[in-house]
Image: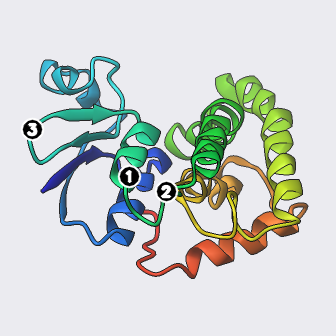
Amino acid sequence: MYTVYGDRRSGNCYKLQLALEQLHQTYRWIDVSVLDGATRTPEFLARNPNGKVPVLELPDGRWLPESNAALHYLAEGSALLPSDRFQHAQVLQWMFFEQYSHEPFIATARFIVQYLGRPPEREADLQAKMAPGRRALGNMDAHLRAQDFFVGAHYSIADIALYAYTHVADEGGFELDAYPHVRAWIERVRAQPGYVALG
């Protein structure tokens, strides 16, 4: 059985929950708060020296941190990861985009607002996330103008990776009204078999 060490409000942790549910995998969830120092204990740092959630524990006892690496591991050999070599690389392309051009802005803005309560001393940081976050959403919207999902014609872990924080982008101050193709894609993701909501 898989074990996920994670925070149920975290989009990065949610990626694994959604994939495990949609892959019909049995797993257990161990709650780890990102605010109370639980990720800095010696026990947790033995699982992930970087001190972040999620960490996926494999049935053989090995640990795999980094949400997109764990997501890729879970999807290997399933319909969530294309077998075509080029499409497989495109899935990775969008997952890298999520981690470098999307998550640092959209997820971090949500963290400042939802986790930290939007403290005045973080307002400048929050505002600095807006323009690059909107640029990421605009790139996604343009891509989705011509297709239903991010890679090929089928739902994949590229969609899971991007959905995790996009569908709650408003919680960090990003309004999705300007991105109609993103909004339509969000509804298509919600309609997928085995879908579970964040939280």
Image quadrant in which the N terminus is located:
bottom left
Can you tell which mark lies on residue 61?
A: 3
Quarter location, residue 177: bottom right
User: Is disc 1 surrounded by few (<14), some (14 to 19) or many (20+) residues within 10 Å?
Assistant: few
| Rendering coords of residue 104 (x, y %) | 64, 31
Q: Which residue type does callout 3 highlight?
A: Gly
Residue 76 - label: 1
Please name whichever residue, 163 or 58, is drawn nearer the observer in this view of the structure: 58
Q: In percent of the image, x 37 and y 57: which residue is there?
A: 77
Amino acid on which the number 2 mark rests in the picture: Leu
The answer to which of marks 1 and 3 sits earlier in the sequence is: 3
Q: Earlier in the sequence, mark 1 or mark 2?
A: 1
Q: Would you say the residues marked 1 and 2 are in contact, meaning their CB atoms lie under 8 Å apart?
A: yes
Q: Quadrant of residue 46?
A: top left
Tally the numbered discs: 3
* Residue linked to disc 2: 81
Q: Please, is residue 176 above or below residue 53 in the view?
A: below
Vertical position of residue 51 compared to residue 146: above or below: above
Mark 1 lies on a secondary structure that is loop
